[in-house]
Amino acid sequence: MLKIQDQGVCLIKGVPQPAADVSPDAARENTMAYQILRAHDVGGDKDNLRIRFDALVSHDITYVGIIQTARCSGMRAFPLPYAMTNCHNSLCAVGGTINEDDHVFGLSAAKKYGGIYVPANQSVIHSYAREALASCGSMILGSDSHTRYGALGTMAIGEGGPELVKQLLSNTYDVAAPKVALCYVTGKPKPGVGPHDVALSLVKATFASGFLKNKVIEFVGPGIASLSADFRNGIDVMTTETTCLSSIWETDEEIRKFYTIHGRPEAYSKLSPADNAYYDCMIELELDKIDCMIALPFHPSNAYTIHDFNANAADILAGVEKEAAETFKKARLALRDKIKKNGVQADQGVIAGCAGGLYENIAEAAGILSGRSTGCDAFSLSAYPTSVPVSLALMRAGLSETLLEAGAILKPSFCGPCFGAGDVPANNGLSLRHTTRNFPNREGSKPGEGQLAAVALMDARSIAATAANSGVITAASDIAYEADYPDYVFDQSVYARRVYNGFGNPKPETELVLGPNIADWPKMQPLSENMLLSLCAVIRDPVTTTDELIPSGETSSYRSNPLRLAEFTLSRRVPDYVSRAKAVQTLEQARLAGEKPHALVEILALFGDADALLGSTQFGSCVFANKPGDGSAREQAASCQKVLGGFANICYAFATKRYRSNCINWGILPFTLGEGADFPAEAGDYVFVPGVRDAIMEGREDIPAKLLTKHGQKDILLHISGLTADEKEIILQGCLMNYYAARSER
């Protein structure tokens, strides 16, 4: 159970107390979060931080684009440890040689610039970072939204690729000084309750309200001592789904043990808040009151206890079916068909990735399945250990044998089940997964082609209990089992033999190996005096995820080719978007070539002297969504819009800082509307923003504009708040690459 307190508290001698007669700004410095942030802040403004990180991590969906951007911006060597893992495209067979071409490129870049290269199926990104890079009091930046190592004493942040580019060019991560939320942990989990149960309870309690948005969560309290390192890591990685900025936990002997096991005892130090630390809000997390959970499609916050779900399955699944019908026009979910006399029948169980594939989760699953069977009917169970060292430990402990005997399948380290590139169920299938997300299409279906399946998130323990019950959804707390397994033993020789570690030893003579699908970014124009926007997508959903902006799954094969990947933009949400954006881009290209496209002249004439405006007005596409950007950190959610000639997004609020940052770094203006402001637009309407370049240069945050619909013109007020000096310059130059190119010419 969680209790939410939306007011300041102080931690005095380890106990939360009302914040009376305290200066929040001064006492916030006593938190672990600010002790670490101040140690990494190289700026002089206490309210606006300029952070330099200790290490970077990327996977094979993102590192090619990052390196291509950085080298075009003048990078000569990696100035800090940069680990590139190959865990997203390693088993995805779409695209011919494309995936392995990216891996060969990554190894050549690690040699040339002095990086760390983790071969395919050796480890998923966050496992390697925990095992080899995390340390108490450090900070890591990753180009994956689930970059979270707070349980190990490392403040980690997931951002889009351009933010890593800045670090590779020895620049800074700029962020307003964040608020800090106290998560005060008490009690001890009940038997059968695992980290995903706790995490889903936390996400359910905080996501919808935005309670933790852009805050740092600080985990403190006597209940932490009852949790293993794996259990803590399993909760911590899911804090991303609350939309928080980062996380940090108190460290203790359990974390000292973690670092000792991994051969890095020097990485441990004791972290705890100083006395009288101030927190802007508090969550009381009572571990002993958490039950086994299930998160129904299409978000981790759509969570229920498994007992409540089973008691009300017809009504709950009817709600999921209704949402699916409203979202997808060519596909249908009939999940109530899964309700049988003995319960709700699932089709598949998967334990995988940075949340599920940990040693302890899989060992617990083996304990539940020991002497039992997954059955010989439709239900199947797969487990993906999070790294080769974890696979070896499971094998040496006899746990792999137990799982295989029960009918489970063990697979290589791979993130695919988290984003729709592995274990795709049949149409109308229901897959239970201990992975991070269950957004639409995260199971790999293609609703535009009439295919649709569903993912529900559950802890590995309850997935194993369900498997032991032939796929009938079952809480692990309802099944008797013993999980008596050996302590984890990490074999670091695996990495010593296979991981290329060239940090500090770049070999500039190395030639980058560029496969035929690895392409440079197209030329992008600086911001012009005025802007005319064609609304090529208008989405009224409460939240629009990055998966909808650029789908995950098989599209990941084209991450290294900006033009090819852009063809998938909004393809599963607004199928006409790409053709509309291309039509706008064609007119803009004609304008830049000195032509006077009749269609463009006609529109500009509605706002003034068309001939005068033609030479000073960019014409680009625009996406309107109520609240875009929840989900993945991958920059392509923004860069694909820009590649197609997108110049702005308009919304009421951005779901995450990372998506807004991605837009800025690609020169897409992040316009917002005032709360409740009327925006009666449809796809095909236009927004004219006069004097937009001067407004950005002068730092004006309120920018008058005109909305043109079939009903006529309407004055609207757009807002851009809190741009840093660098962000203004990036937008003025047209994108981050242009910004660096301009600096190098000075």
Image (tube, helix red, strand yellow):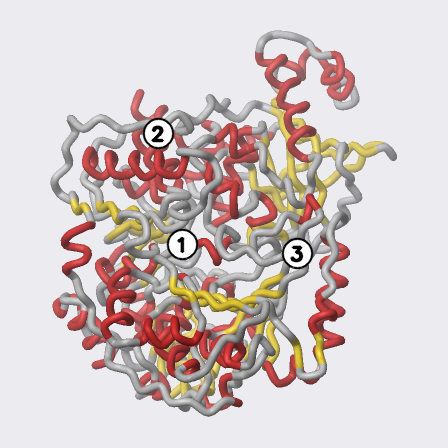
Q: CA distance from mark 2 to mark 3?
A: 47 Å
Q: Would you call the spot at circle 2 few (<14 residues within 10 Å), some (14-19), or many (20 or more)?
A: some
CA separation, marks 2 and 1?
A: 22 Å
In front: label 1 or label 3: 3
Name the residue rendered at 79%, 22% in the picture: 606
**Vertical relation: 200 (above or below) 421:** below
Residue beneath label 2, please?
A: 740
Q: Place residue 171 in its image quadrant.
A: top left
Q: Which residue is mark 1?
A: 158
- Residue drawn 56% across and 61% down? 438
Left or right: 463 as drawn, with respect to 405: right
Q: Disc 3 designates what residue?
A: 427
Crowd class of label 3 (few under 14; some 14 to 19; many from 20; radius 10 Å): some
Residue 196 position within the rendered picture, expressed as x and y whole percent measured from the top left:
47, 74
Which badge, 2 or 1, is on the more N-terminal residue? 1
Looking at the rendering, in which quadrant would you find the C terminus? top left
State the separation of the CA atoms marked 1 and 3. 33 Å
Q: Quick one: label 1 or label 3, which is nearer the N terminus?
A: 1
Q: Nearer the viewer, residue 631 or 310?
A: 310
Viewer-proximal residue among 556 and 463: 463
Residue 380 on image: x %, y %: 52, 67
In-front residue for pair 198/329 = 329
Task: State which quadrant residue 679 falls in.
Answer: top right
